[in-house]
Image (cartoon, grey):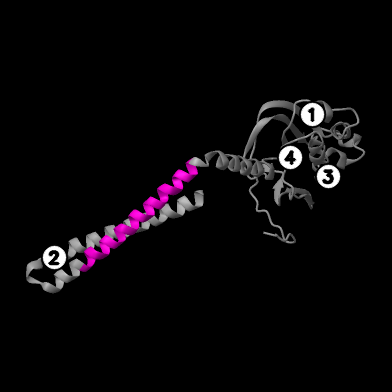
């Protein structure tokens, strides 16, 4: 319904512009220096021709405006149904990560321990943040019911890739470096599950990684900036 209204509105605009151009053309002809309509039969015929075309276009404009008003009336009548569909689309976009979302949840900050004594380090890798660490944390957040997650401002969606590229980590194909901030919109009790003894975050702490976790009532997670690509799905529509 909205597409029809927009289309008709564009048609009205085009017709209005056409009328304006035609009127200006007639005025230009009649105002040309040294020409009188009474003395030039050919010019009079031209003006009459333009006037007839003007009347025809104006009639079309009136018909389109009447149709547009009809569409507006129908849209008003079906506003309840339209609003329900609009809310459904908005909710789906939120779930797909196509819109920015806000809410309460948890913030997890990870950093490598630069102050560790190298002589006491048994495994250097345990002091570093890896792609596998981020994947485990994201999975834990989804397990506790997170509605939306971001890593350093990159929205996590169902097609997100978290992978190691040499000595750097890429999320959605973009480089992320420490310190890493993971935001998740979820229920507050998730904090207890994330910090439980034996959980993955506690293992990272014992390994030497610096981990900070806090609750927040004001979390903003940006929309997904990439493009969804489906190569193997066929539509039945």
Using a 10 Å C-alpha cutoff, classify the residue at mark 1 as few (fewer than 14 neighbours), some (14 to 19) or many (20 or more): many
Q: Nearer the viewer, mark 4 or mark 3?
A: 3
| 36, 157: nearer the viewer | 36
Estimate the spatial distance between the alpha carbons at disc 4 and disc 2, rounded to whole Å. Answer: 74 Å
Left or right, residue 132 beside residue 86: right
Going from the N terminus, do you reach mark 4 or mark 1 first? 4
Q: Secondary structure at mark 1?
A: helix
Q: Are marks 2 and 1 in contact (CB under 8 Å)?
A: no
Q: CA distance from mark 4 to mark 3?
A: 14 Å
Per the rendered image, the range of residues in magenta is 49-76
The answer to whether residue 36 of the structure is visible from this angle is: no
Check disc 4 and report the residue beneath it.
Answer: 178
Point out residue 8 in the picture as x, y percentages from the top left corner. Answer: 43, 54
Which residue sits at x=76%, y=50%?
Answer: 161
22 on left or right of 185: left
Q: CA distance from mark 1 to mark 3?
A: 21 Å
Residue identified by numbered label 3: 132
Residue 171 picture location, percent across and down: 73, 47
At x 90%, y 28%, the residue is 197
Give the class, few, some or many, for how many residues have Cα within 10 Å of label 4's Cα (few <14, many ≥20).
Answer: some
Q: Could you classify mark 2 by the number of other residues whose Cα lies within 10 Å: few (under 14), some (14-19), or many (20 or more)?
A: few
Q: Which residue is mark 2?
A: 32
Q: Earlier in the sequence, mark 2 or mark 1?
A: 2
Residue assigned mark 1:
190
Q: Which corner quadrant of the image does residue 151 belong to?
A: top right
- Please name the residue shown 23% across and 60% down the image: 24
165 is within the stretch colored magenta: no
Residue 52 among magenta residues: yes
């Amino acid at each position: 319904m909205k597409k029809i209204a927009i289309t008709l509105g564009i048609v009205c605009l085009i017709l209005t512009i056409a009328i304006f151009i035609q009127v200006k053309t007639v005025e230009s002809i009649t105002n040309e220096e040294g020409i009188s309509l009474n003395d030039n039969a050919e010019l009079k015929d031209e003006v009459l021709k333009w006037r007839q075309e003007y009347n025809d276009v104006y009639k079309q404009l009136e018909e389109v405006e009447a149709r547009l008003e009809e569409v507006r009336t129908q849209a008003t009548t079906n506003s309840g149904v339209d609003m329900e569909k609009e809310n459904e689309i908005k909710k789906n976009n939120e779930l797909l990560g196509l819109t920015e979302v806000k809410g309460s949840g948890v913030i997890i900050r990870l950093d490598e321990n630069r102050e560790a004594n190298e002589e006491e380090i048994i495994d250097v890798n345990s002091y570093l943040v890896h792609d596998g660490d981020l994947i485990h944390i994201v999975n834990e957040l989804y397990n506790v019911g997170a509605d939306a997650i971001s890593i350093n401002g990159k929205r996590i969606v169902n097609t997100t890739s978290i992978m190691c590229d040499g000595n750097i980590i890429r999320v959605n194909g973009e480089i992320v470096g420490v310190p890493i901030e993971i935001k998740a919109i979820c229920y507050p009790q998730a904090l207890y599950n994330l910090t439980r003894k034996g959980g993955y975050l506690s293992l990272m702490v014992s390994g030497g990684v610096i981990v900070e976790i806090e609750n927040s009532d004001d979390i903003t997670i940006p929309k997904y900036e990439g493009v969804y690509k489906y190569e193997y799905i066929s539509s039945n529509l």
